[in-house]
Structures are given as C-alpha cells and as structure tokens.
Image (spheres, coloured by chain):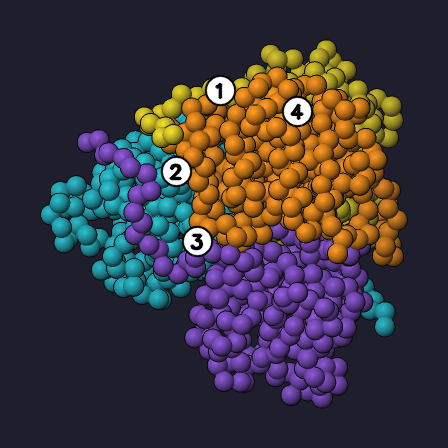
Chain colours: A cyan, B purple, C orange, D yellow
Amino acid sequence: MTRIRVTVWNEFRHEKQSKEIADLYPDGIHGQVASFLGATDDIEVRTATLDEPENGLPDSVLENTDVLTWWGHMAHHEVLDDTVDRVQQRVLAGMGLIVMHSGHMSKIFRRLMGTNCTLKWREMGERERMWVVDPAHPIVEGVGQYIEIPHVEMYGEYFDIPQPDQVVFISWFQGGEVFRSGCCWHRGKGKVFYFRPGHETLPVYYHAGVQKVLTNAVRWAAPTKGPYPHTKDGPNYPAIEKFVVEK
Amino acid sequence: MTRIRVTVWNEFRHEKQSKEIADLYPDGIHGQVASFLGATDDIEVRTATLDEPENGLPDSVLENTDVLTWWGHMAHHEVLDDTVDRVQQRVLAGMGLIVMHSGHMSKIFRRLMGTNCTLKWREMGERERMWVVDPAHPIVEGVGQYIEIPHVEMYGEYFDIPQPDQVVFISWFQGGEVFRSGCCWHRGKGKVFYFRPGHETLPVYYHAGVQKVLTNAVRWAAPTKGPYPHTKDGPNYPAIEKFVVEK
Amino acid sequence: MTRIRVTVWNEFRHEKQSKEIADLYPDGIHGQVASFLGATDDIEVRTATLDEPENGLPDSVLENTDVLTWWGHMAHHEVLDDTVDRVQQRVLAGMGLIVMHSGHMSKIFRRLMGTNCTLKWREMGERERMWVVDPAHPIVEGVGQYIEIPHVEMYGEYFDIPQPDQVVFISWFQGGEVFRSGCCWHRGKGKVFYFRPGHETLPVYYHAGVQKVLTNAVRWAAPTKGPYPHTKDGPNYPAIEKFVVEK
Amino acid sequence: MTRIRVTVWNEFRHEKQSKEIADLYPDGIHGQVASFLGATDDIEVRTATLDEPENGLPDSVLENTDVLTWWGHMAHHEVLDDTVDRVQQRVLAGMGLIVMHSGHMSKIFRRLMGTNCTLKWREMGERERMWVVDPAHPIVEGVGQYIEIPHVEMYGEYFDIPQPDQVVFISWFQGGEVFRSGCCWHRGKGKVFYFRPGHETLPVYYHAGVQKVLTNAVRWAAPTKGPYPHTKDGPNYPAIEKFVVEK
C-alpha cells in the first residue's frame, strides 16, 4: 500500500518560550500531531518548523508531501512570502492542506481564501461542543453526533471566509457563540480543510475525537492521481472542432 | 430614490495604442460601459482609469462607490499593490465588484479568489452561446434561455477559480469548449460577479444581452445597508452568557 | 410601483383549540404575519388557511401570488396532495416560498427538499441567539451581528436538509445545541427560504428582528421577471448548430 | 479488505423488446455495468431488475447494498412507490446512489431532488465532450481534461435540479448545447451522483472513460462507517447544558 506522506508544520515558538506550554507539548505541537497521525498504517509523517531553512519547506519537501498540516499563531508574519507562494502553488497542483486553530490568520490560509479570515475570540477555558452537520462526509467517519471539548479558547462568528464547499462541524460555546469549525474547500487540484480545535495552552491534541477528525481529514485531503495538468499557465488552445466563422 | 453609485474602471491602454480599438470604443471601453449603465434610472456612473493618480481609485472615490466594475488586460501588473489592498478591503466591507473578461487575471480578482484564475483561450472570432443554468437568479432577469454572441474570443475550462456560490451562465463555443461564464461569490459583506463576455477588438459591449446582464449584476451586487461591522479586525469578545468553568 | 403579492398561509388549528394561543394570536398566526408584512409600502398581503376549499390555495390564488409563506404544525397530513403538487409546480415556475418553524415537517417542504427534514427539539423556553454568518446576503439587511429571542422552542442539528445554497443564520441555544436557522435554496425558477423562529405558544412573531428578516425574505424571494420557460416538460430540441455526424 | 457491495439496477425492458438493443447489450445494460465494476478488486456486484418481486430490491437486498446504481427509461412509472420509499430511506441512512442518463426522470431521482429534473434532449448521434471542472474531486481521478464520446443522445440545459454540492463535469455538444453531466449531492448520510452518459442504442457503457468515472463514483459514494444515527425520526431531546430560564 502506498502511504499518504504528511508534513506536519509548526511555528514552534510558544513551546520554546513558555515552560507551561513545553510541559504540555514536550515534543512541540508538531510532535504530538505527528505522533497520532503516524500511528496509523496508511500515513507516514515528517515535521517541519518555521526556523528551519526555507521555513522547513523547500521544494524537495513540498514535492514529496501529499498533505501539509499547519499550526501557527504568534509569528505568522515571519513566514517568508516565497514559502507562501510555493505552498499555494503546491496546493493548486494537488497537495492537501489542513489548517488548524490560530492558523486562520496565517499568510497561506488568507492567501488561499482571499478574505481577512478574522473572527471573535476569548480565552476563558469554556466548553465547546462541535456538532456534525454533514453526516455523509468522510471527515466525520466514526464521529458521533458531536465532539465535546471541556476547555477551549472560544472562536465566534462572523468568521470572514468564503462560503465553504462543505461545512461539516458547527460549534457551540458556553459563552453564547457559534462557529463553523470544520470547513472544506477545493482549490485547483488541491483540497483545504480548516479545523478549529487546538490551543497552545490546552491539551486539545490529546483528545481522541480531535485526533480522529484530523486523521480522517488527511485521508480526505490526499491528492487524486492522474494526468490532470497544473493550472499555473493559461494556454492558447487550438480548436478541437472544425468550424467556419460566418461573418 | 437613492441611486446605485457605480465606478466603471478601465485600464484604458488598448484604446490609446490601436486605432482599430479606438474606432470601436471611441470613449474607451469604460465610456461604453458607463454609457449603458448610466442610461438607467437607478444607477449613476463615474469612470476611473489606470493612469490617473492612485489608479483613479483614491479612498474618496472608493468610499462613494457602491459597485466597482473592472476591465483590464495588458497592464494588470501596473496596478499598484496599494490599490489592490484598498479595493479588497472595500469589497469585504460591502462594495460590489464586477470583473469582466480578461479581468480574470487582474491582481484584485486573483487576490479575492486565492487561486491562479487561469483558463484556456483562443482568438478566432468564433460563436458563443451562454446558457442560463440558474433561472431563479436576479442576474438573469429578462434573459431568455441563452445569449448568443456571434464573434468572441474563446475562454475554456478548466477555469481555476473557487467553486462559485452560484453559477448562472455556462458557455458553449464552436471550437469545442465550455466555460462557467457567469459566477457569483459573497466575500465578507461584499458581492463579486465574474462575467466572461468582452474583448477589446470586438463590439461585445454593444450587445443588448450583455448590457442587460451587466445592469442586472450591478443591482445584485449593490451593498445591503445596515449596522454590520467590517471584519478587518478580530475582536477579543466578552462572554454574552454567564457561565462557570468546571475544572 | 408594482407591489409584491404575498399569500400568508396558516394551518390555523392551534388558535381554535387553545384559549392561550388564541389570546396570543387573536387574528391567528397568519393575521399577525400579514399584519407586519402588510405594513410596508411594497408588499400586499392576503391570507389562506387549511380548512378553506382547496386549502385556500386554488389556482386563482397561486397564480396571483409572488411569495407564499407557510406555517403549519399539527395537521401537516391534512394538506391535500393535490395542493402540494400545485404549490410545488408554482415554486418551480417562480413563486417564492418561505417556510417557518414547524413547517419543516410540512409536505411541501419535504417534497421540495427530498429529505426527511427531521431535527431535534425541546420545549423549555430557553434563550436563542441567531448569528449572522453571511453578512452580504440581502436577507440580513439591517440586522446586526445576531438576533436574540428570549424564550423559544429549541431546534437542534442534525437538520436533515440538502446543503443550503446559502446559510445566513446559525443559532445558539442555552441547552447546548446549534441550528442552521436561515437557509436559502433556488429550485427551478423559484426561491425557498426556511426560517426557524416561531412557535404557537410564544410571541415570536411580535419580535422586531424576526419581522425584519421575514420582510427581507419576502423581497429576496419575489420572482424575477422575464421570458424564461417553466421546466415541467423536457422538450425534444432541434440542433441550433449545423453539424455532420461522422461515422 | 472489505469490498464495496454494489447492486446494479436496470429496468431491463428495452433489451427484451428490441433485437438491436439486445445485440448491443446481450446481458442487459445491468450485465455490462456489473461486468466492468466487478472486474475491480474492491467492488462486488449483484444485479436487480424491475420485473423481479419488489422490483428486485427487497429490504434484504437494500440492507446489504453499499451503493445502488440506477438505469431506467421507458417504465419509470412502473417502479412501485413502496420501492421508492425504501430506497429513499436507505440513501438518507447512508447508501450511495448513482443515477445514470435517462434515470434523471426516475421516481427515486425526482423524489430525492424535489424538482422536475427535466432537460432538453435530441437523438442525432452527435459528439459530446465532457470537460472536468473540479479536478480535485475523487470522481475524476485518472481522467484527463475531458472525455469525448463520439455518438450520443444530447441532453441540454436548463437541467431542473437543485444546485449540486459539486459539479464535476460540464458537457459540450455538436448541436450547440451544454449540460452539467456529473453532479454530486449529499442527502442525509448518503451520497448521490448523477452521471449523464448512456443510451440504450449506443455502446456508451463500453467506453473506457465512462467506465472509469462510474468506478470512481462507486468508491466516492460508498458509505462512511460509524455511529451516526439515521434521521427518520426527530427526537425530543433533553438539554445537555444546565440552565435557568429567566422570565
């Protein structure tokens, strides 16, 4: 079986600057995400982080990545524009992209969405309940009616994104807000999934339901094979059918 | 009655460089578009062009524009990035945007779409037939089953755009291709319409059906009124409901 | 100005069977809905109820109705199948349809959706907050970030409907659920809007925000004019283009 | 490996009434479809036809079917309403449904769509070219830019269907029309794919491209596993969160 090649990208700054966060994610958030994704039979993982050369994403990595997962928060502006350009083109050429939590403000997500991607937020450790609203979607396979997470940072609407091709989760928060927490888009030959859960100070990536959804999302986002050309260039295209122009 | 304030933007270069094109559009493509839009009771028009200061779109103009129409082709790269930034934010804040024909490769359209926006093309003057595929949509009001244009530049799929919120026209071409020729998106508080017809060397903007659709599109894209806040900033938001976090 | 002709349909049974409900809606739910819709300049209203001949919706009424609003609950099964057939065909031919609250289980809504249209529900008089998630949509014109209703019957996901063309409201409930409360669809030449608020024992249709949305919805759902043919028959269609079949 | 259990349904009347059609499809259209689907490693097939008891689709068959494919044309009205009811509920409970060609007028497709499902048509044996317009979709895996079929019955817009969740193919025809030839919908827990190609008098189901798409579609439409409940009943649902109603 050919395995899905996943690159788990992390900004990896919070973990270096806060003992509390380092204690929670001793191998970094990327280490924890890689850990549960890599525990499957059909996924192989590597990791990459902001401070590596070319942000850890040179062409040699991107060309061997089927799905890229993205976690960033405090250093979005430090991601190189060249990295953003190359990741965008790889997505349009077929690579899956899974953006988590505060990655909603990352350069690459905003580039692909074309909007501000802003939202409301609040840190009080309140309860979230993510309801499934598209039970036919492969991303919710094995999930019940909802996923409950006991303590989270709240994200509230209006979430300034393009209308998703499919919304699979809508969240409820104790404080009174709702949020489209699982959103799918096709972009060129690639697939993009935004998934809300995750916060550097909370053990969200140890939650079994969150892990299941992210694993499902990798499988959904893996590229289809085949001869379809990349869309970077728009060709002058000869007529397929013969015809006569009548003046 | 409050009229819809439209700014008709044109690159306005072809008309200066080619006598043939100047003969076809003696007041510029913008002049012709402004002419039929302005002939209605409910629309008032001004024009703006690339070579004016701030590309003719200073804040004083944008803030008094309900709908901006865009025509560009040979000088997309000359549009200032600052202009693109400001137009994008105005769209997200509610201004309608109508992008015509070769504007698919404009900076502002690609910015808002997040994709390459490439397509196939061919200049042979072949016949196009734009079929209505969403007869409930206000943009097709008064249009019959299709609009036929005798001589056009062909645009063919794959058109590298996000899945439209609504596709209202699909085109047939003599040479064997199809194209999603009328596409609608909501972006933030604003509406975007891409409309395929139009070419600098062809009298497409004198075609009654094309004029009708563009007029309908202006009305559809006009902003809704009301107190909804702009989305440029994502606020830290206090809880609406009282709750106790159970540890 | 040509006014939008609205027929406000009500099952009108609860009001006859319960003094409490009759006290709340002394002219029937239809009377109250007709009252605020009819108070505008651009809408004219009539009402129709289940126990009238042909359920109050003979062809002479439907043919002079631009938008039909629907409220039913305890007697969905008593609506004649012939009425459902005729309303469905009128919608597909262009009439707008606005289905409120418990109308989600009406024959006509289920017919047009093709699904079971089931949901979770609870009557405890809890608080609802309907968040705007598509601020560009004309149905939310003049609404702020959310509409709060102090005491409602809860409706919860999964709401078994086709993916809406546009979701404009998502509700939050005190008890822990969410719901897609404002949903838009195009069907043939007609538009359909489902709007959650409303309950026979609660004064929801006296709420200013609810009234505003329903008024906006009538304007959105009003049919476009023009020559587009009805789709009841699928014609054998002669070729538009000349061509030779090569064997 | 657990294989996908496919039931290939066919009306199976044309083949009995016309020698020409019987020569083209000696084992029936169902036999030919079952033949190429069953030649894969991951799909197992059975067939069912109209004239069998319960139209060949008793509960014992439906409950062991992951994906049902449907071909009908001249006897749509003979399918039992009870069969339509049961197939509809199985789709909403998770079974995939693939409707081919003239199945657009079948009771089950019209039931699930809620519209008339009419279209234009013409039998002249003209050429069709189905263009891929969603290259990220798993249904187009391994397909190039388009599939060309030399001789077909034409189907033209307006196709009276709900806006698809995803359109994957748009067809071009020699005679001047276009058509949304590959359309995807989620309905409840189930997935529905409409695929245009196929005609009883033409060898369309021997075409390699058509076979590839139908095989991909079976894989896409196979149900997701897991605990999600069926939606036939809408439960009265106790509050998850504790709250106090403030009067």
Mark on residue D235?
1
Q: Say whether residue B61 is left or right of residue A35.
A: right
Mark 4: amino acid: Phe
**Real-space Cα distance between discs 4 and 2?**
36 Å
| Residue that label 4 marks | C12
**Real-space Cα distance between discs 3 and 2?**
16 Å
Query: Quick one: SS at disc 1?
Result: loop
Mark 2: amino acid: Ser
Are the residues under badges 4 and 3 in a single subunit? no
Mark on residue C135?
none
Mark on residue A171?
2
- Label 4 resides on the chain identified as C
Are the residues under badges 1 and 3 in a single subunit? no
Against A54, is C183 above or below?
above
Mark 1: amino acid: Pro
Are the residues under badges 3 and 2 in a single subunit? yes
Residue B200 position, x and y percent, is 69, 77
Query: Quick one: SS at disc 2?
Result: strand
Q: Is residue A19 visible?
A: yes
Neighbour class for label 1 at 10 Å: few (<14), some, many (≥20)?
A: few
| Nearer to us in this view, C66 or C108 | C66
Mark 3: amino acid: Asp
| Residue that label 3 marks | A160
Mark in the foreground, 4 or 1: 4
Neighbour class for label 2 at 10 Å: few (<14), some, many (≥20)?
A: many
